[in-house]
Image (cartoon, rainbow, N blue to C red):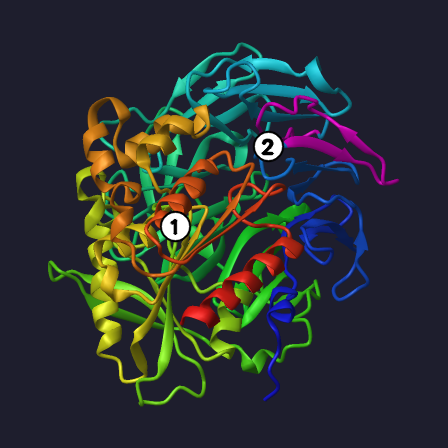
Amino acid sequence: MAEYDLERYLNVRSAYGASIGPDGRLAFLMDTTGVGQVWTLDEPGGWPEQRTFYDEPVSFVDYSPERPELVFGMDEGGNERAQLYRLDPDGHVTDLTGHPDAKHRWGGWRPDGEAFAFASNRRDEAVFDVYVQSRDATGDDADLVYEGDGWFTVGGWSPDGERLVLSEAHSSFDQDVYVLDVESGETTHLTPHEGSVRYTSVSWGPEGEALYLVTDERSDTLDLARLSLDGELEVVRSDDRWNVDGVSVDRDTGRLAYSRNVDGYTDLTVGELDGPTTIEEFPTPDLPGGLAGGVAWGPDADRFAVSVTGRTVNTNVFVVDTETGESERWTRASTAGIPTESFVEPEVVRFESFDGREIPALFSVPADAGADGDTPVVVDIHGGPESQRRPSFAGLTQYFLSRGYAVFEPNVRGSTGYGKAYTHLDDVEKRMDSVRDVRAGVDWLHDHPAVDPDRIVAMGGSYGGFMVLASLTEYPDLWAAGVDVVGIANFVTFLENTGDWRRELREAEYGSLAEDREFLESISPINRADRISAPLFVLHGANDPRVPVGEAEQIAAEVADSGVPVEKLIFDDEGHGISKRENRIEAYTRVVDFLDDHV
């Protein structure tokens, strides 16, 4: 089989984030130009029309319910201070927000299409207020309808257009839900509770009489539940092993789709409410890939669009007939000429950690790997830590496999997808237990007949970057090299310098500067950098508002001072991650060359 270079793999396209207009037209994001831009389609497999032409990636697109106009979001250089824009049918773009120093988080169109809602920290960088703005207003013409005192987002309008549902995040595992009367400004708190409880993926039900959401209020896993406007919670669907990880309800018809996360794969159920907590289920949609999300309902909810991906299926938008489950692929994001049969599907494996706990992982082995123990491995650790490595398409992963590397992706303790108790196993003083899980995973790899134990690489981004650095300091003899992408090197400087709007949320997970400073210093890789002996590649974006670029600069300097080979690459036009294709090609070409030299 032909061998393709890295640039070809990174040129595999993605189409995703769809919205269906009132005329049935499909809008979506596609990265043909190197970053996600807005495109539209009139029919499945038709010739798509590019509608935006920016150097920066567009973050979302949402059609008006009444007109062939849409709103999209975009920041500058990865700074996450997203602005909102209206795109008219003739291609004219209007800057709706005009506050480039503030974040704006889309809250949806009012049902009549005459106004929309959003949350923003333009008044105070550390908190989010709620605004309502006429569709043809701009800048300061938005009405402040709720003055927040925390991390608020808008979950959407009631069917009558008079109320908004608001979510307040106290941490990644603790939220509250409120209903705001837009005219009076009065809020009703629906979820008073003690401890950490998740209430996410909130949708208005038909007639505006209740909300449907997912929550772990009554179980270790996330349930699908109905929350009445007087605060009564009723469980609609429950699974004692797997999370219900999302629900979308069409507020006019009561048709809904919800997904279960089954060992990282999506199990999608579609139906219609036949009573407050009863669902008439329709046939299961016929979709490839194993992962699906981002449900967007069409007019009358007779069909919906969904983004579909898998480890051997690049991301494209499918439209599903709600009642029959029949699906049709609308977009044609290409695989850059690489045959799909060359892509490798991972195996879900489990290994025993230091305390006897079973840790899940995805393990992918090159097609030609034998049992002779000469296969190098990339241990790719996800960020978050409140996240989960799921088998979506990843061009870099497939490239490594094509070049003879195996790829091992552990979902260490603290990962989502395996119940509430599992997510809390790495909280604060238990932080390094997750690093011990990585060690146990490498021990498991040592016993695999294909693996070369002397050529194992640690790679990860964001919190995964911290895990890389911590693994290199705690277990220096295990690693042939490390790749740290936008990672945390020093929890103290990270918390001191991260965006004001994020600090409280992050302290809930990692520990606070006021109470846990000594502990945070003790686990920060920067303070044990002299233990790193494996060559290190450090990659970062200069505009990163989450993990400031100083984290990369200080760890690269410390390790280099020890005489260990270090390469550092910082992009001036990137933020928390490398999003632009030309930058990704440069960055990962350098990473691959680095690994070829040292591994």
The answer to whether residue 303 is seen in the rendering is no
User: Magenta segment: does it hold 400?
Assistant: no
Instruction: Say which amino acid is labelled 1.
Output: Ala
Q: Is residue 58 left or right of residue 519?
A: right
Relative to 253, residue 239 above or below: below
Tell me the magenta residue range: 83-112
Name the N-terminal-most of marks 1 and 2: 2
Find disc 1 in the rendering and name its residue.
560
Residue at left offset 75%, top offset 66%: 45
Classify the position of the N terminus by image quarter. Answer: bottom right
Q: Provide the secondary structure element on which disc 2 rests.
A: strand
Q: Nearer the viewer, mark 1 or mark 2?
A: 1
**Crowding at label 2, few (<14), some or many (≥20) Cα neighbours within 10 Å?**
many
Classify the position of the C terminus by image quarter. Answer: bottom left
Marking on residue 460: none
The answer to whether residue 85 is seen in the rendering is yes
**Image coordinates for residue 289, horizontal then vertical, percent:** 52, 69
Q: Is residue 392 left or right of residue 440?
A: right
- Are the residues flagged by discs 1 and 2 in contact, CB closer than 8 Å? no
Q: Separation of disc 1 and disc 2 at Cα?
A: 43 Å
Q: Is residue 467 left or right of residue 403?
A: left
Find disc 2 in the rendering and name its residue.
106
Residue at left offset 66%, top offset 66%: 329
User: Magenta segment: does it hold 90?
Assistant: yes
Among the 4 quarters of the image, the one containing residue 367: bottom left
**Image coordinates for residue 566, horizontal then vertical, percent:** 43, 55
